[in-house]
Every structure is written in C-alpha cells, then in structure tokens.
Image: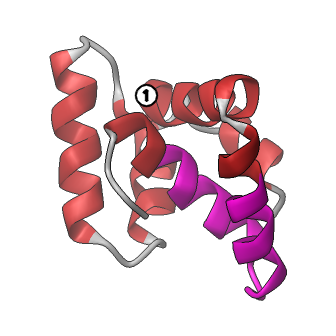
Amino acid sequence: MLLGDLLTRFADESVAAEAILALGDLTLLASVRKEAEARGLEVGAFAAGAVRHFAAHASDEEWVTLLGAMNHDPNPGIVCFRRALTHALGTKS
C-alpha cells in the first residue's frame, strides 16, 4: 500500500495505530499517543499531520537523509512515515 493511500485511512484510529505498530517501535506509538493527546488530536490526525508537515517544511538536509534511507530499504513508505513521526516529535529516527 502506498503511503498516501494509508494516510487517507487514518480517520480510523485502528488503522493509524496499526500503521505505527508496523514500525516495530512501541515507544514511538506511546510518544505519538501522548503528543496527539496533548494537542487534542486523535492519533490518526496527528500522524497524517506529521507527514504533511514534514513534506511541506523539512529542510533540504532532512530530505537528502530521508532519500538515502529510503534508497536502502525495501519499504520506503515505512521509512518516510517513521521519519515524519520522529521529526514531528523532535526525536532522532
């Protein structure tokens, strides 16, 4: 499934949580839930917003780093999703 297709399904909180769980990082899921709650958002809305914000505002350096990581991974959508979430949380991926 393409990342864009997944993001459109994030209105369903179980889809959003499942996508974050697919990253294999329970700490990341807990951090996303905590940050979403602090902002008064559902997990899916936070996750979709994180990807949109990354796409619109990431620095050239962030994009070069992301593209390099995506190039070396069989699932580049997951790499992009993780990077967007960690960027939104202000953590390192």
Number of residues whose C-alpha sits closer than 10 Å to that of mark 1, classed few (under 14), some (14–19) or many (20 or more): many
Report whether 79 appears left or right of 85. Answer: right
What's the amino acid at mark 1? Answer: Phe
On-image quarter of the C terminus: bottom left
Which span is picked out in magenta? 64-85
* Image spot of residue 39 (x, y percent): 25, 14
Q: Is residue 67 above or below residue 7?
A: below
Between 51 and 2, the residue placed more toward the observer is 51
Residue at the spot 33% in from the left edge and 39% down from the top edge: 89
Task: Where is residue 11? Give x, y as percent.
Answer: 54, 28
Of residues 86 and 15, the one drawn nearer to the viewer in this rendering: 86
For the point 48% across and 24% down, the residue is: 45
Q: Residue 12 versus residue 89: which sits nearer the camera?
A: 89
64 above or below 72? above
Residue at (76, 41) in percent of width and height: 60
Whether residue 68 is in magenta: the answer is: yes
Q: Position of residue 24 (x, y in %)?
A: 38, 78
Look at the magenta stretch and give its main secondary structure: helix
Taking the image as shown, residue 80 lies to the left or right of residue 28, namely: right
Q: Which residue is mark 1?
A: 46
Q: Secondary structure at mark 1?
A: helix
Q: In which quadrant of the rendered image does the N terminus lie?
A: bottom right
- Residue 50: say if magenta: no
User: Looking at the image, which residue sits at the far front?
Assistant: 61
Q: Is residue 85 left or right of residue 27?
A: right
